[in-house]
Image: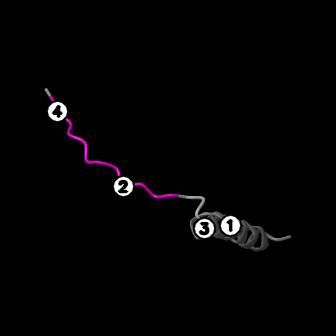
């Protein structure tokens, strides 16, 4: 394999990893396993 082939393979591997993560999240949202909660705004006091 040439350097260009290795670079392309690394790019494709990264894209596949990102898509896999996206699909897992979408599956959890679709099946109701992931519940998105809105957090209350918190007040921070700096002294």
Identity of the residue furthest to the front in this view? 32
Q: For mark 2, what is the residue?
A: 38
Disc 3 crowd rating (10 Å Cα; few below 14, some 14-19, many 20+) is few
| Of the image marks 4 and 2, the number of the one nearer the N terminus | 2
Residue 3 bears which disc, if any? none
Q: Nearer the viewer, residue 22 or 16?
A: 22
| Of the image marks 1 and 2, the number of the one nearer the N terminus | 1
Judge whether 44 appears above or below 31 on screen. Answer: above
Q: For mark 1, what is the residue?
A: 20
Identity of the residue furthest to the top in this view? 47
Q: Mark 3 and 1 residues: CB-CB less than 8 Å, in contact?
A: yes
Identity of the residue furthest to the right in this view? 1
Judge whether 36 appears above or below 39 on screen. Answer: below
**On the rendered image, what quadrant is the N terminus found in?**
bottom right
Which region of the structure is painted magenta? Answer: 35-46
Q: For mark 3, what is the residue?
A: 22
Q: For mark 4, what is the residue?
A: 45
**On the rendered image, what quadrant is the C terminus found in?**
top left
Disc 2 crowd rating (10 Å Cα; few below 14, some 14-19, many 20+) is few
Q: Mark 4 and 2 residues: CB-CB less than 8 Å, in contact?
A: no
Q: Residue at x 56, y 58 (%)?
A: 34
Left or right of 25, for residue 1: right
Between the C-alphas of marks 3 and 4, the distance is 37 Å
Question: Residue 24's quadrant in the figure?
Answer: bottom right
């Amino acid at each position: 394999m040439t350097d260009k082939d290795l670079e392309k393979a690394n790019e494709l591997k990264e894209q596949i990893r990102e898509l896999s993560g996206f699909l897992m999240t979408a599956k959890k949202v679709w099946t109701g396993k992931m519940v998105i909660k809105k957090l209350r705004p918190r007040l921070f006091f700096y002294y």
